[in-house]
Image (cartoon, grey):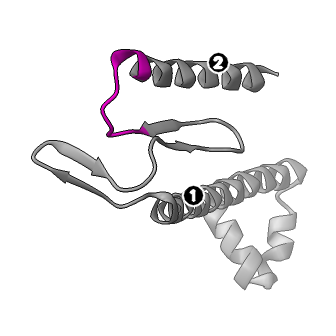
């Protein structure tokens, strides 16, 4: 008897139980294994989909609440408010964005790059523990 037919009988046709019971232990074990795999895959896909949607909503809310007003015209980005603006994930460093549209020297810009590199190094050390 095919797998999906067994699933259908186990749900909708209780009269077929004696016939399914004569298939033996190996067949029942195979049925249970396939059923568990199918249920796990369906459950996993649903969970990943929900987590992905939740994380995207969380990110959108974070950006909406924590991003200052900005404009981009003629190739220039203008940000209102105090600068630099730093976006990081405080729980576990996955990303860092630093926005600063004020005039900076190369040395000051390099300090931002060094900060990102140092934070990335600390994160990778914590990740390996």
Residue named by callout 1? 55
Q: Residue at x 41, y 15 (%)?
A: 107
Q: Secondary structure at mark 1?
A: helix
Side of 116 relative to 23 (left or right): left
**Toward which corner of the image does residue 42 lie, by quadrant?**
bottom right
> Closer to the N terminus: mark 1 or mark 2?
1
List x then y, in percent, for residue 2: 63, 60
Q: Nearer the viewer, mark 1 or mark 2?
A: 2
Taking depth in this image into account, of 49 and 70 the one nearest to the observer is: 70
Label 2, residues with CA under 10 Å away: few <14, some 14-19, many ≥20: few
**Label 1 to label 2: alpha-carbon separation:** 25 Å
Side of 30 relative to 88 (left or right): right
Q: In the rendered picture of this protein, how many numbered marks are placed on residues?
A: 2
List x then y, in percent, for residue 11: 74, 79
Taking depth in this image into account, of 44 and 128 the one nearest to the observer is: 128
Q: Residue at x 70, y 67 (%)?
A: 6
List x then y, in percent, for residue 95: 54, 36
Label 1, residues with CA under 10 Å away: few <14, some 14-19, many ≥20: few
**Toward which corner of the image does residue 40 lie, by quadrant?**
bottom right
Could one spot residue 2 in this view of the protein? no
Q: Residue at x 35, y 56 (%)?
A: 80
Could one spot residue 14 in this view of the protein? yes
Question: Which SS type dominates the magenta stretch?
Answer: loop
Q: The magenta stretch spans which residues?
A: 99-108
Residue named by callout 2? 121
Image quadrant where one finds the N terminus: bottom right
Asked if 61 appears above or below 112 in the picture, the reply is below
Image quadrant where one finds the C terminus: top right
| Residue 55 is covered by the magenta coloring | no
Taking depth in this image into account, of 37 and 122 the one nearest to the observer is: 122
């Amino acid at each position: 008897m095919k797998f999906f037919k067994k699933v259908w009988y186990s749900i909708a046709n209780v009269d077929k139980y004696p016939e399914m019971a004569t298939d033996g232990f190996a067949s029942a074990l195979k049925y249970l294994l396939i059923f568990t795999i199918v249920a796990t895959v369906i459950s996993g896909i649903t969970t990943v989909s929900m987590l992905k949607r939740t994380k995207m909503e969380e990110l959108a809310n974070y950006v909406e609440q924590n991003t200052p007003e900005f404009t981009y015209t003629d190739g220039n980005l203008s940000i209102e408010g105090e600068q630099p603006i730093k976006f990081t994930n405080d729980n576990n460093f996955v990303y860092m964005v630093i926005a600063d549209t004020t005039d900076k020297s190369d040395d000051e810009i390099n300090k931002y790059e060094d900060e990102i590199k140092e934070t990335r190094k600390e994160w990778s050390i914590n990740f390996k523990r």
